[in-house]
Amino acid sequence: MKFFVDTAEIDAIAELNDLGMVDGVTTNPSLILKSGRDIIEVTREICALVTGPVSAEVVALDAETMIAEGRKLAEIADNITIKLPLTWDGLKACKILSGEGRMVNVTLCFSANQALLAAKAGATFISPFIGRLDDIHIDGMDLIHDIRTIYDNYGFETNILAASIRSVNHVHECALAGADVMTAPPEVIKKLAIHPLTDKGLEQFTKDWEKTGQKIL
């Protein structure tokens, strides 16, 4: 499963990228606002930092303007993925932009039917939002399983990009469910390395080593 980082913070991306933990980046208007940066400027900087897809989201609501904004964003770098909402206008824009050979990430997916439409419209990625479904007491992982089954049934090449990841358990479950990609905030990705038994074992090893009175350096 590929790891995308869900942030527009350059330092956080760079730290994970240096460890080989970044296969791509996702951004959205809320993350751009949080960064306090100009969308074109910060997106160009991210694209120069990572080699994988970088999702940049349109803000228009009608298909014609979405297409124009998508083309403008695609000029930033070759690894731009145009991020579109899963609306009827978004699907229209997806069909046109994907037909032009551009990568498209269709976002805000909350049902398997929506994912099916996105695949038929030529989406490169579909972004089902797990955490937001959990918020309304629907198991978001069921959606990942359903999309995986449907895509495999019919040979759709659209990548399942699990989004709205809130916990390390979400990451684990997405991997088991067969998501192609997951995107998560940097702090969630870092928490994947943490386990209380690792900490306990390291503490014991350190105490025992101190008792030997030895040094490696």
Image (cartoon, rainbow, N blue to C red):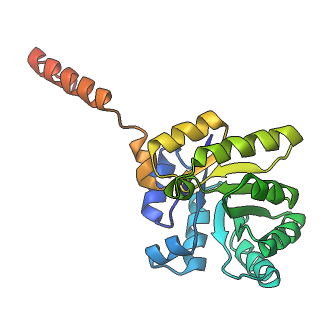
Q: Position of residue 198 (x, y in %)?
A: 31, 28
Residue drawn at (87%, 41%), measured in percent from left and top? Answer: 155
Q: Relative to 199, say whether 30 is above or below.
A: below
Tell me where residue 27 sits by quadrant.
Answer: bottom right
Residue 51 screen position, x and y as percent: 64, 55
Residue lying at 45% horizontally and 79% vertically, measured from the top left: 36
Can residue 83 be spotted in the picture?
A: yes
Residue 124 visible at all: no
Left or right of 179? Residue 138 is: left
Q: Where on the picture, by quarter, is residue 97?
A: bottom right
> Of residues 42 and 104, which is closer to you in this image?
104
**Residue 203: image location, x then y, percent:** 20, 27
Residues 206 and 217: in front is 206
Identify the residue at horizontal 50%, vertical 70% (top origin).
31
Quadrant the C terminus occupies: top left
Looking at the rendered structure, the number of numbered marks drawn on it comes to 0
Percent of width and height locating residue 142: 64, 43
Residue found at the far front of this picture: 137
For the N terminus, which image quadrant?
A: top right
Q: Nearer the viewer, residue 198 or 174?
A: 174
